[in-house]
Image (cartoon, helix red, strand yellow):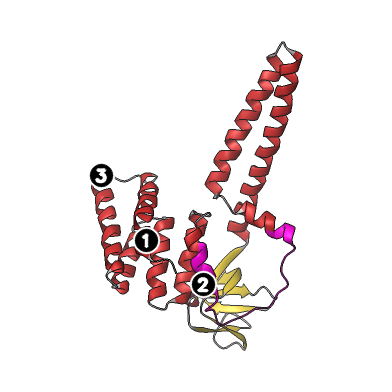
């Protein structure tokens, strides 16, 4: 795992950029920045429990930052909280899809997960498309699609008003190409919105959890999962999540044993 100290400046910069998007007065913004710095200091001194406590305070204040989740994941990992660490690094990648450190930490943590679910890999084209789609956040996709749409309309307007056939054709071709790119980014945005609403994932945070045939402790245990494994969350009821593994096994887990991404 990459040490926090190596990336403190970068993470602080990312944290400050995230704060800029939140409507805060000057005083709370200063106190939040101080709290983040204090948490980083605790981590660098090896006081991981206090670092985690301070990072969680920031989350409770509504600070939803990729840098904050990254540092919190590191603090959890140092305390051998594998499930919580994986959850936090997954959240980091939701906020900062290109974060190589978080991806590297997840690769390391996945080697420590007890459960191994054997499923055939997706075809290479699908894996490539999935990687491309998740290189940007939903917000970035939305902005790019909007800018491309505006550019396509501008170029088409140039085609309509141009008096020179050569420039008119060039404007039309450029407008068509830009419109196609806008559609691609729009599709990427739509897919991510679908995933967020209908393809929920969760991380098991209990060291060991029994998956039952129904929502209730009196139901039969169908299989057992361990800390850190990723699950698909397919439904919920009071106190329970309906979950499934990539191999098709499904059942119900207590809500407190899963953190939904």
Q: Is residue 75 above or below residue 31?
A: below
Residue found at x 55% / y 82%: 114
Residue 177 image position (x, y, % from top left) = 71, 33
Q: Do the residues labelled 3 and 1 touch (CB within 8 Å)?
A: no
Residue closest to the eye, 121 or 140: 121
Q: Distance between the residues labelled 3 and 1?
A: 29 Å
Q: How far apart are marks 1 and 2 (CA)?
A: 18 Å
Report whether 49 appears left or right of 166: left
Answer with mark 1 or mark 2, whichever residue precedes in sequence.
1
Quick one: label 2 or label 3, which is nearer the N terminus?
3
Q: In this view, does 10 lie to the left or right of 39?
A: right
- The circle drawn on residue 108 is 2
In the picture of the structure, the residue carrying the numbered disc 3 is 26
Q: Which of 131 and 200 is in front in this view?
A: 131
Is 186 rendered above or below residue 117?
above
Q: Quadrant of residue 64?
A: bottom left
Q: Quadrant of residue 146?
A: top right
Mark 2 Cα shell of 10 Å, populated few (<14), some (14-19), many (≥20): few
Point out the frontmost of discs 3 and 1: 1
Q: How crowded is mark 3: few (under 14 residues within 10 Å), some or many (20 or more)?
A: few
Instruction: Tell me which residue sits at (30%, 67%) in the image.
Output: 44
Q: Which residue is drawn at 63% across and 24% down?
A: 154
**Residue 1 x/y as whole percent:** 44, 69
| First reached walking from the N terminus: tag 3 or tag 1 | 1
The residue range painted magenta reads 103-127
Please tell me whether mark 3 sits on a helix, a strand or a loop.
helix
* Residue 134 colored in magenta in the image: no
**Residue assigned mark 1:** 6
């Amino acid at each position: 795992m990459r040490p926090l100290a190596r990336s403190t400046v970068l993470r602080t910069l990312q944290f400050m950029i995230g704060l800029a998007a939140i409507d805060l007065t000057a005083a709370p913004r200063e106190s939040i920045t101080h709290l983040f710095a204090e948490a980083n200091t605790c981590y660098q001194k090896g006081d991981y429990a206090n670092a985690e406590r301070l990072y969680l305070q920031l989350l409770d204040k509504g600070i939803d930052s990729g840098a904050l989740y990254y540092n919190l994941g590191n603090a959890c990992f140092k305390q051998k909280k594998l499930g919580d660490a994986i959850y936090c690094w997954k959240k980091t990648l939701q906020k900062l899809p290109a974060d190589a450190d978080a991806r590297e930490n997840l690769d390391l943590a996945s080697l420590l997960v007890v459960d191994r679910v054997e499923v055939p890999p997706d075809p290479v084209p699908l894996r490539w498309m999935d990687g491309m789609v998740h290189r940007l956040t939903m917000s970035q996709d939305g902005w790019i699609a909007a800018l491309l749409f505006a550019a396509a309309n501008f170029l088409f307007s140039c085609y309509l008003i141009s008096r020179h056939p050569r420039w008119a054709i060039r404007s039309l071709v450029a407008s068509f190409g830009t419109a196609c790119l806008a559609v691609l980014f729009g599709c990427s945005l739509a897919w991510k919105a679908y995933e967020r609403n209908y393809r929920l994932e969760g991380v098991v945070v209990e060291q060991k959890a029994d998956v039952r045939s129904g929502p209730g402790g009196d139901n039969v245990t169908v299989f057992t999962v361990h800390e850190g494994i990723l699950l698909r969350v397919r439904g919920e009821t009071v106190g329970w999540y309906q979950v499934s593994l990539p191999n098709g096994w499904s059942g119900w887990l207590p809500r407190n044993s899963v953190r939904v991404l």
